[in-house]
Amino acid sequence: MEDRGGVWARERANLNDLQECFLCAGVTEYSNVEEFHAKRRMLDNLKQRVAYVPDTNLLYHGFLSKQGDLTFEDVVLVSSVQDEIEASLNYKYSDVQIAEMKRGALYQKHLVDVLRNRRMKSSRKAAYLALRKYRRLRDRCPQIDSVMETGSDKERNDVVIAKTASEYRKENPVYPVLLTCDALMTDICESEGLEHFLFKFPQSWETYDVDLGRLLELIRLTACTLGFLKVNNVAIIGEYGGKRSLDELRVTFPGARGDEFIRDLMMSRELVKCFS
């Protein structure tokens, strides 16, 4: 694929996109997660209740769902996290941008057409990664109102999260620990005198033992985040007009293979009934 700059340079798949999908699907993990658990054990000795405050990026990576020893009561959500996610949801491609992307792509140019008037990559990530995880947490974790308004400036939004956690510490008998994977956020925490932990992206593509559920989740997240994904000769499309739910995917098969797949699928379901 050629790099012609502009929309195509921003929207095409890159290493960071894949890392986020792998993390969110639980197929890989931060490289220093054991250091985090060690720090947790140390903080457990404090007389105050410890509250872990994730920044927005950790919601994109499925933070809480992978830290089995953290309970929902251990985590406190800042309200501005929801605002930041929702502010990223509705950026859509124009016809001009679709045309530019088709010029940049070397192969399967026709697939770009399915993204016409659909969400851009940043909005897809917000919808399929962050918002989904946030919805699972919001009704279970304590939430605190942000002390400042948020906007489109990410650095300002980081300041809002840190300052809110700092004020929460002053007004409640609690010891907040801000969790982030953004090195710039640690500077903000230092200026606020706020305890924090910086998660680090994995430096290799080593993965856990991947069960079927995690593999399917990885395929779904990757197809939805990138817009479409090719698995062998099958195209899995995650963003398209008429999509009715976040979990819905469209699959296209070469030639008559679709009929064969449906036949095999129906046979498999009948066999499952026989043994259930």
Image (spheres, rainbow, N blue to C red):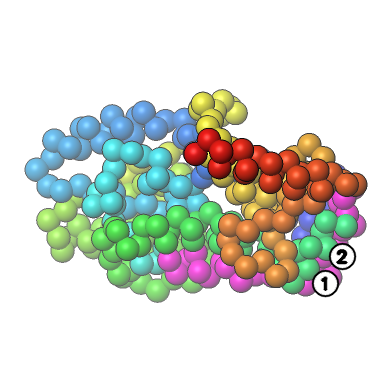
Q: Residue 202: where, in percent of width, then height?
A: 53, 32
Q: In the rendered structure, which amino acid carries the disc numbered 1?
A: Asp
Can residue 156 be seen here? The reply is no
Q: Residue 193: where, in percent of width, then height?
A: 27, 50
Q: In the rendered structure, which amino acid carries the disc numbered 2?
A: Ala
Q: In the displayed image of the protein, which residue is found farthest to the left?
A: 47
The residue at which mark 1 appears reads as 95
Q: In the displayed image of the protein, which residue is found farthest to the front?
A: 274
Q: Residue 179: where, in percent of width, then height?
A: 36, 47
The answer to whether the residue labelled 2 contacts the one labelled 1, judged by CB atoms less than 8 Å apart, is: yes
Q: Residue at x 53, y 35 (%)?
A: 275
Write down the quadrant of residue 101 in the picture: bottom right
Q: Residue at x 87, y 50 (%)?
A: 108
Q: Residue 84: where, in percent of width, then height?
A: 48, 66
| Residue 121 position (above or below residue 15) | below
Can residue 131 be seen here? The reply is yes
Does the magenta run of residues contain 93? yes
The residue at which mark 2 appears reads as 99
Dot 2: few (<14), some (14–19), or many (≥20) neighbours within 10 Å? some
| Residue 183 position (above or below residue 188) | above
Please indicate whether residue 68 sits to the left or right of residue 110 in the image: left
Cα–Cα gap, marks 2 and 1: 6 Å
Please indicate whether residue 31 sits to the left or right of residue 115 in the image: left
Numbered range of the magenta stretch: 82-109
